[in-house]
Amino acid sequence: MTRYIRRAAALCLVLLVALLVNSARVMVFQASSLDDNQANRRNMIARYDQPRGNLLVGGKPITGSRDTGQLFRYERTYKNGPLYAPVTGYSSQLYGTSLLEHTEDGVLAGTDSTLTPFPLWNDFTRSQQPGGDVATTINADAQKAAYDGLAGRRGAVAALDPSTGAILALVSSPSYDPGKFSGTGSATTSAWKALNGAANQPMLNRAIRQTYPPGSTFKIVTAAAAMDAGVVSDVTAPTNTPSPWLLPDTSTLLENEATGCEDASLADAIRVSCNTVMAKLGVQVGLRGMVSAARRFGFDDAGLRLPSGVSRSNFDTDMDRSQLALSSIGQFNTTATPLQMAMVSAAVANGGALMQPHLVDRTTDDRGNTLAQTGPKTYRQVMSPGTAMELQAMMQDAVEDGTGTNARIPGVAVGGKTGTAQHGVNNKGVPYAWFISWAQSPDSGTPAVAVAVVVEDAEADRADISGGGNAAPIARDVMEAVLNSARQ
């Protein structure tokens, strides 16, 4: 009898060990895959069982959480949703997250390890902390000025602090309200379907995810390349350029929209925007030199993050001389995001040093204690300080007595460059209106803001599209908003 009892006890022990091993296998080795299984709703229930942390502009929340009383209890809300959508992105119970709502999800949802009192706390307790907040670098007045300036027209605005890289405005138009599809139900799915099917693409973030031919605004890059390469040593000297100019190795004549471009100096070519002078200078710099210069400004960089990803701006690396000539005036295959062109202006304004653009100033826990803070970081030294100083003077001339007079601000040093980029088959599409600029108040030693504006405006008459006429007034309003807020 004792023998049978021992055998039964041994069998029970084996079964107990097998049960423990299987439990350990499930809890340790399969926990992650089970957590991520779409059929497991426990994580979703826990995720929405507490209010989400907020995104802040000027210390004030532009997001919130609404108690629905449903299974997924707290639903995301947005204050001035269309105004800030290119910054916040969306947080939807059905469709996930985007932009800052995505990149900062751990802090906002309370799952980030920096929120826990001890390392691995959440892993052991299977819990989450109260959501933290994310303070953005956005200037509320500049954001509104950019949004109001576009007035629903297709286009975008990006504004930076040249000395820190902080993004002061990021606007895409037309926009959308991310609160329309925060929850669940038929209204959410209908709103999502309508927005994604809209012909004017309101959910496309044109400021950082859309690239355009930059047109004549790219001439600032070409000018920097020519001066740093020694192709131009005196910006006031004639360049021996005919008007029109025969593109190399072709029978095609390159024309100028402006007058006075025959044998114009570099300074005059920037002031009135001469195609011929700048295209010829690009060819003289050469393909290798132009590629190197463009890349210093950020072109061809597919890894730029804000922390949200930014579409790659393009400058081709394999071109013949005529293609290089067109690329040097922002045409052919040259494309750029509005953020990229704001970076070009910022590098000039900051003495040739381009700072890393960033959208998050700091993250905090629910009590306001700082978890992490973003400091200024140099992206690249784009050009020599001497070249930057000469470009600053040339851009100021373009505003004072050139194509950018609509960007003037009384008593303020403003530099700018217009652009009218052609596109479409045989350039029959309505041109894009561009303006890049920077502004420095007289009582400051450093520029306060650098701006890029692009207006698509497909409904306007072709003759009405111009960087100076359509885009410069928007840039002026954004710059004034930043300068005025600095005085308050």
Image (cartoon, rainbow, N blue to C red):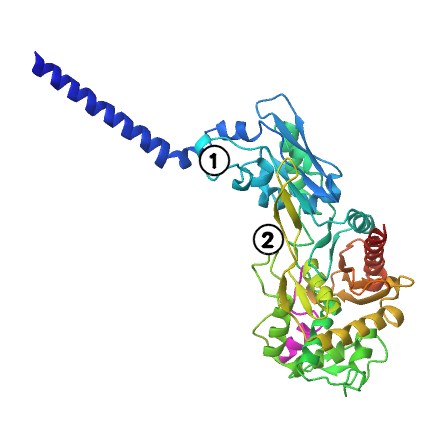
Tell me where residue 321 appears, x and y as whole percent. 63, 80
Instruction: Look at 47% across and 35% down and name the residue there.
Output: 121
Which residue is denoted by mark 1 in the rendering?
Answer: 121
Instruction: Look at 71% across and 81% down and name the residue there.
Output: 280
**Residue type, numbered disc 1:** Trp
Q: Secondary structure at mark 1?
A: helix
Q: Within the image, what quadrant is residue 112 found in? A: top right
Q: Is residue 341 above or below residue 226?
A: above
Instruction: Look at 73% across and 73% down and name the residue there.
Output: 388
Q: Within the image, what quadrant is residue 395 found in? A: bottom right
Q: Which is more toward the observer, 473 or 437?
A: 437
Q: How many marks?
A: 2
Which residue is denoted by mark 2 in the rendering?
Answer: 309
322 drawn magenta: yes
Q: Between label 2 and label 1, give the one nearer the viewer.
A: 1
Q: Is residue 189 visible?
A: yes
Q: What residue span does the magenta drawing correspond to?
A: 321-337
116 drawn magenta: no
Instruction: Look at 71% across and 78% down and name the residue there.
Output: 279
Q: Which is more toward the observer, 362 or 406?
A: 362
**Residue type, numbered disc 2:** Gly
Q: Is residue 149 above or below residue 335?
A: above
Tell me where residue 151 appears, x and y as whole percent. 82, 48
Q: CA distance from mark 2 to mark 1?
A: 30 Å
- Neighbour class for label 1 at 10 Å: few (<14), some, many (≥20)? some
Q: Is residue 46 above or below residue 438?
A: above
Quick one: quadrant of the N terminus?
A: top left
